[in-house]
Amino acid sequence: RAEEAQGRFFPTALLSSDLDEAIARTLNQRGFTPQNTLFAHSVCSDEVNNKDEQLVDVMVSRWQEGFSLGGLGGLPFAGKSGFRAYLHHVPDSGKLLILFAPHVGIDGEGRVGALQREGQSAVSKACGAAVGSYKAIQAKAEQARKEGLLPPSAVRDIPDYDNDPFDPELGIIIDLLTPRLKGLEQAAEPITFVTYMMYTIVRDLLDNCIKETPDVWEWASEVALVGGVMVNRKSGGDFFQPLSFELRRSVSVANGRPTDVYREAFGPRPDLLPILGSEDAVRRVLGPSKPGEGAVSL
């Protein structure tokens, strides 16, 4: 059932090792090497994303170092100060490579947002911050849910042990996620929709960090950004649904327009319309970043 759910909701997901190979192949042709490139990742701090031989570990091994930008939900809670620190560690005239993604579990029953963790008999949430934020938004709009605007999820009744309503990171996620739930009632599955919207939050915040750091091009000659969704499974390895892959250079080169290398690296983009339920939601996910969207800037 997990395989079936993944194929339905994350239709072009790749094994971690295959994604790593595709990224390296594409970037090596453009002069990215471990010697001139500093890797960073903005993924959720959940330990499931840092297992041996899975994506973060594999990419740190390939690029030889890894700067952590991410906090709960994969949001770059290191903020602009953390991004500047990362930037200022790049080799002279070197390149930046940033992987960013929220994550989501799929359990043996095919439930999106649930995960059977090693050593535990109970099923827990993944991403707990994303699911917890959605539940908090549901609680505030219970009447709207009854009217069909915020449908319940299959993991709604899995207990919360680690979400505190006064937690600052969770509060920011709730603030940023709430306005992005427009159209959720049309989606095939609510937590899948939430996860794709979490991707847009991480993407836009990172874009904001880059655009509001005026000396980026004094330190780096090129920035590669790879974004998507990490899919955690108890067995069969973890997967990654790629959603974007672009290269950026100084505004003095090619009018500052990003170079889209997604198709070259990964093939055609996934058809998200049956998953997200509306063209508007698809545009929000696959379209360009909107760094000003949302109530909070890190």
Image (cartoon, rainbow, N blue to C red):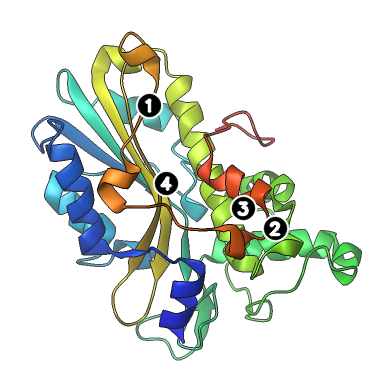
On the picture, is 49 further left or further right than 175? left
- The residues tagged by marks 4 and 2 sit, at their Cα atoms, a distance apart of 20 Å
Question: Circle 4: is it few (<14), some (14-19), or many (20+) Cα within 10 Å?
Answer: many
Q: Residue 273 carries which label?
A: none
Whether pointer 2 and pointer 3 mark residues with C-beta atoms closer than 8 Å, the reply is yes
Three-letter code for the amino acid on which mark 2 is drawn: Pro
Amino acid type at mark 4: Gly
Q: Earlier in the sequence, mark 1 or mark 4?
A: 4
Label 1 sits on residue: 258
The label nearer to you, 2 versus 1, is: 1
Q: In this view, does 112 lie above or below 277?
A: below
Q: Residue 255's x, y, as percent?
A: 38, 12
Residue 119 placement: quadrant:
bottom left
Q: Do the residues under discs 4 and 2 have CB atoms within 8 angstroms? A: no
Q: Residue furthest top?
A: 252
Residue 87 appears in view: yes
Secondary element at tag 4: loop
Q: Nearer the viewer, mark 1 or mark 3?
A: 1
Instruction: Read off the residue under disc 3.
Output: 170
Could you say which is closer to the camera, residue 222 or residue 10? 10
N-terminal of the pair, mark 4 or mark 2, is: 4
In the foreground, 41 or 270: 270
**Label placed on residue 165:** 2
What SS does tag 2 mark?
Answer: loop
State which quarter of the image contains the C terminus: top right
